[in-house]
Amino acid sequence: MNYISNIARSEGDPKVLRSGLSSLTAPDRLGKALGWFSLGLGLVELLAPHRITRALGMEGQEALVRAYGAREIGSGMLSLSTEKNLGLWSRVGGDGIDIATLLTALRDDNPKKQNVTTALAMVAGITLLDLIAAQGTSARHSRNAGDRDIYRNRSGFPDGLAAARGAAKGFAVPADMRAALPAVPDRARQETALTH
């Protein structure tokens, strides 16, 4: 991955040695995808609850589906924000609620029982992805109380502080830049003006 990051860099640019905390890992990318999925599903549940309840044989539960849509949108927004752990874990909890609701529709007298079974399988698969993303991002982004970054040994100079000392010695301002600088009287002229 670091090799790929260095391809587009110019010769003088710093090289990527290792990825930092802000790099997106596989669980981060999965969490982002699940956040967008959650927004889309939530919109469908808000805008077309009749189609969903009709397909599952749950007519009369449109208000419940709309509430689940609002929950999905909230979880999706959190999953795409800086509070991604909270958003992903809320998706896991929402999946549990969805499974419980679908189980109530898995009755012998429901003519759409096969659709409910398919929906349960899909929700179970999504739940597994939600768990993987939530656990992965929690492990990567959570900090223990004693963990903190220590920067005492960092100088900000890639070759070290000793190599940076004297690096600007003998640096001459190019002629084209001198023309743009304001005229400054030299020190000798200033000193003679002060003594007279």
Image (cartoon, rainbow, N blue to C red):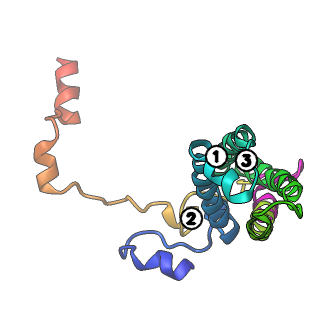
**Tag 3, which secondary structure?**
loop
Look at discs 2 and 3 and give the one toward the viewer: 3
**Tag 2, which secondary structure?**
helix
Q: Crowding at label 2, few (<14), some or many (≥20) Cα neighbours within 10 Å?
A: few
Look at discs 1 and 3 and give the one toward the viewer: 3
User: Looking at the image, is 69 positioned above or below residue 108?
Assistant: above
Quadrant of the image for the C terminus? top left
Residue on which the image places disc 3: 59
Name the residue rendered at 38%, 58% in the picture: 168
Where is residue 134, by image quadrant? Answer: bottom right
Mark 1 and mark 3: span between their CA atoms?
A: 9 Å
Q: Earlier in the sequence, mark 2 or mark 1?
A: 1
Residue on which the image places disc 1: 49
Whole-percent x and y of residue 54? 67, 53
Whole-percent x and y of residue 89? 80, 52
Whole-percent x and y of residue 90? 79, 48
Name the residue rendered at 82%, 57% in the picture: 102
Q: Amino acid at mark 1?
A: Pro
Q: Earlier in the sequence, mark 2 or mark 3?
A: 3
Q: Which sits in the foreground, 84 or 185?
A: 84
User: Looking at the image, is 195 positioned above or below residue 141?
Assistant: above
Q: Earlier in the sequence, mark 1 or mark 3?
A: 1
Residues drawn in magenta: 135-149
Residue 80 appears in view: no
Name the residue rendered at 65%, 60% in the picture: 34
